Image (spheres, grey):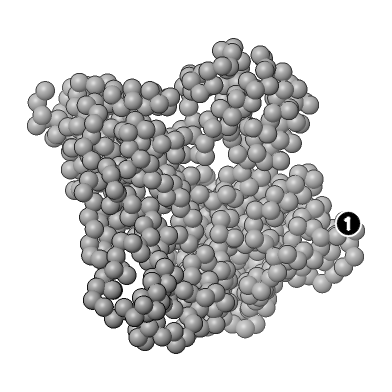
Amino acid sequence: MDEGAVVANVLAFIRGLRHLGFSAGPDRVALALRALRAVGFRGWPDDVRDALRTVLASTRDQEALFDTAWEQFALLLSGSGSHPLAGQTLLAHVARLRFARRRPPQVIWAGAASGDAGDGKPPEADKQVPLVVTGGGASPNPALRHKDFAALTEAERQEMERWTAAARWPLWRRSRRWRRHRAGTVWDVPATLRRQLASGGEIVRLERRRRRLALRPVVMLCDVSGSMEPYSRMVLRFAKSLIRSGWPLDVYAFSTSLVRLTPALRDDYADRALEHAIGLIPDFAGGTRVADCLGTFNRRWARIALRRRAAAVIVSDGLDAGDPDAAAAEMARLARLAWAVVWLNPGLGRPGYEPTARGMAAALPYLNGFWPAHTWASLEEAWERLARIDPLLRPYASWAGSPTG
Amino acid sequence: MRNPFPDIGAVERALAAQDYVAERALAVSVYLALELEQPLFLEGEAGVGKTEIAKVLAAALGRPLLRLQCYEGLDRNSALYEWNFPRQMMRIRLLEAAGRAGEEGVEDDLFGPTYLIRRPLLEAIDPPGPAPVLLIDEVDRCDEEFEAFLLELLADFQVTIPEIGTIRAREKPPVVLTSNRTREVHDALKRRCLYYWIDYPSFEKEYEIVRRKVPGLAPALAEQVCRFVQELRQQPLFKAPGVAETIVWARALQALGETSLRPEVIEQTIGCLVKYRDDVEWMRRQAAAGGGR
């Protein structure tokens, strides 16, 4: 076999892989060629593929992508034809496959026209649009902070979409790591003895240590069904600003199905991030199936998302067509997995609201907090209350389903 | 370490001799890890035999296995080395009592090998005998700080202890890292390793595994067991059973002297397979509905 030709082919293949998002640096390429030599061509035909894959892929998804690309490559080599052209075809084809894997589901807009923010044109219905002067861009108008999202005019909404929530209250948890601290409760023997060396063998002071503090991860499950329409957009906006200020926040949207939005929301451009995130939701402003979505979350994501004693925050009005018993079972499971579970309900902002919706009543016993979320200020307040919550306390644990207020 | 296996087939045979039934692709990865002296990064669901591969490899190579179990808060002191401060302290006091504390060479002695507590990573770099197989288990559980430290260590297999000097591995030990993917391990660490995703085995492989691991089990029952488990993995369970669970279940059935899978027996032994109460409840409902066998 002509070794030069083989090497050339493999190099061409690796170049193709780079287009598919593989980070194959020179060290990896060298290793791939060494692997090729080690495996040789006398063994099984698939050995060469397996060898290159174990060197070049670094996730399960990449393994699958690699196999597809390899098949295409093999087809290409066994066929005849102009190589540069065929090479382009190969890449184009694999790239298309990749695109199909990544493409977000189509957006179905079932909501009101007011959802279509961003084009800068207020709907005709709002005749009395107030003139809003946005000087620095991000100085929250105190009146707006307390205005119900549902009552916002289009212009106000647009102004608020520029806000970045300065959530000042860090959510701490104790890390498993130690640091030296004067007021620590645990005697740090090694540190004391090291100090002793410095002072000529005398113990001058007992060094202490305590657990380091780390940021507590928060998982937010945001209801984006039709009944939540005026609120969900602003809640996502709020979540985006929290992510931007560096909080470990993991965001999911649910209505009839559950979607993880965090990767989309990491985009630095807030508007693009939000549009991308909303585009990922298959049925923005559709119906709700709380139990199904919580079930999906519990099975698929919870073990990953709720590690390190994360708090779970559900933002929903609790209007659910599903089976309340199933919702209660999933809530129970979620409550076992999370450090604390908090429910933010825009309905609580309305005077005289009672959590009588069946889905809501089923969830109440498992909650550590049940707070309003109808204004920007209430979201900020909820975030601050979350930092001071007692995870052992469930104020509605004895809730029997009858509204008592 | 020099790779003792001449080709991939030899790796396959060596694994099989230890009753480890591996896909050919896994044998390729193991072979390359030894041949190219690269760490092997294994990912997969719990109970598919990630840890087992390190044990089997150590046995096949005739080398000891060193295991470092990762957890949040794991640091250099418990992974690499630590000075035995209490013992040093006692030594100083004894020397003082004997009036010899000021003598030459006391510090050299105090910061010598006697007072060094060697943790798994140092042991792997500087073993008393031949290089062991180093298993770094459940890397996804440690925190980012430790991951960065691992990165440094896996790159050149040397550590610097200020009081002693730099210790370099005489031969690079084979390294196996495993992850359950409770979080995504940093790319930089993965890129320094060969990667392999261990999937649940096919029916044929699983049957072979059960036959090897539980030789006393009737072939017909082994087949039923594997079919049941394979079917179960398709269901919406909180945690699907791994191969480890299959083996335990097969052993349980054998211990009970069963010859075929009866619904009552499944009911009694289901704790071997599914470990969440919700999953057990789900299976009971399915059984009651006559759907899930």
Q: Is residue A198 above or below residue B106?
A: below
In-image side of B113 versus A139 (left or right): left
Quadrant occupied by the N terminus of chain A: top left
Q: Is residue A168 above or below residue B11?
A: below
**Is residue B263 among the parts visible in the rendering?**
yes
Q: Is residue A137 above or below residue A307?
A: below
Quarter holding residue B237 = top right
Residue ID at (27%, 42%): B130
Residue furthest out toward the front: B98
In-image side of B54 versus A381 (left or right): left
Residue ID at (57%, 68%): A173
Judging depth in this view, the residue of A34 and A132 nearest the camera is: A34
Judging depth in this view, the residue of B12 and A363 nearest the camera is: B12
Q: Chain of mark 1?
A: A
| x, y percent for residue A293 | 65, 47
Residue ID at (78%, 70%): A350
| x, y percent for residue B59 | 37, 33
Quadrant occupied by the C terminus of chain A: bottom right
Judging depth in this view, the residue of B24 and A46 nearest the camera is: B24
| x, y percent for residue B141 | 48, 53
Residue ID at (53%, 18%): B215
Q: Badge 1: how crowded within 10 Å, few (<14), some, or many (20+)?
A: few
* Element type where label 1 sits in the image: loop
**Is residue A321 among the parts visible in the rendering?**
no
Q: Which residue type does callout 1 highlight?
A: Ala
Residue, disc 1: A400
Q: How many marks?
A: 1
| x, y percent for residue A331 | 72, 52
